[in-house]
Image (cartoon, grey):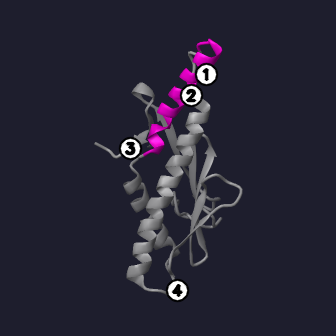
Amino acid sequence: MKDLGLNHLDWIKDLVLAEQQMEETGVVNLSTVDTESHLEEQTIEFLRDVKAAMVEVAATFNQLKGSGVGTLKIYGISNTKADFMLFRNGYKLIFSMRHPGEIEIYHSLLTSHFLNPVEGEAQGPEKDLIRAHWAAFGELQWHHKNLPVRIDFLVRHYLTRFIHESAK
């Protein structure tokens, strides 16, 4: 069974608070879950999980490569709740919450064909989207092009492509 951690038990706290409020006021609230708020919280949590995985693999990459030119750096983006970017040799790969339930991943260079290469065609930065979908029993699942996403494979894919693109 997957380790759910303490963050996944917040719903119990909300359940207890709703029951206490019902006992105090005598009013029963049948709609205790704010889906928009829940979606935003889950999006932020997903981005933080992706960032934690990226930090782990970047540290391993940097350790094996040795210090100096070409190491990976990861920065949080100010004035956001969980956005972050990878940086190396002037290249940036940005992970950003577009809005609750949708995450953009894009390369910062306008001339790059990092995400969706097209031969001989000039275009702006392409953006990949990771979208949340509600599953049975209120489970939130993440998808890219309607296919389920696992963080370990997402990190492996983008880090590999980023390393190749940013190599000098």
Q: Is residue 66 above or below residue 163?
A: below
User: Which residue is more in the foreground, 60 or 163?
Assistant: 60
Distance from label 1 to label 3 (Cα)? 27 Å
Q: Amino acid at mark 4?
A: Val
* 4 vs 3, front mark: 3
Along the line of sight, the residue nearer the viewer: 155 or 60? 60
2 or 4: tag closer to the N-terminus? 2
Residue 11: percent from left, percent from top: 49, 33
When the figure is inspected, residue 138 is found, relative to residue 45, above or below; the finding is above
Which residue position holds label 4? 69
Distance from Cα at disc 4 to Cα at disc 1 = 58 Å
Q: Can see residue 145? A: no
Circle 2 sits in a helix, a strand or a loop, which is it?
Answer: helix
- Spatial CA distance of label 2 from label 3 is 21 Å
The residue lying furthest to the front in this view is: 24
Residue 162 placement (x, y as % from top left):
49, 68
Instruction: Measure the alpha-carbon separation of dots 4 and 3.
Output: 39 Å
The kind of residue tagged 3 is Leu
Residue 113's disc is: none
| Tag 1 near tag 2, CB within 8 Å | yes
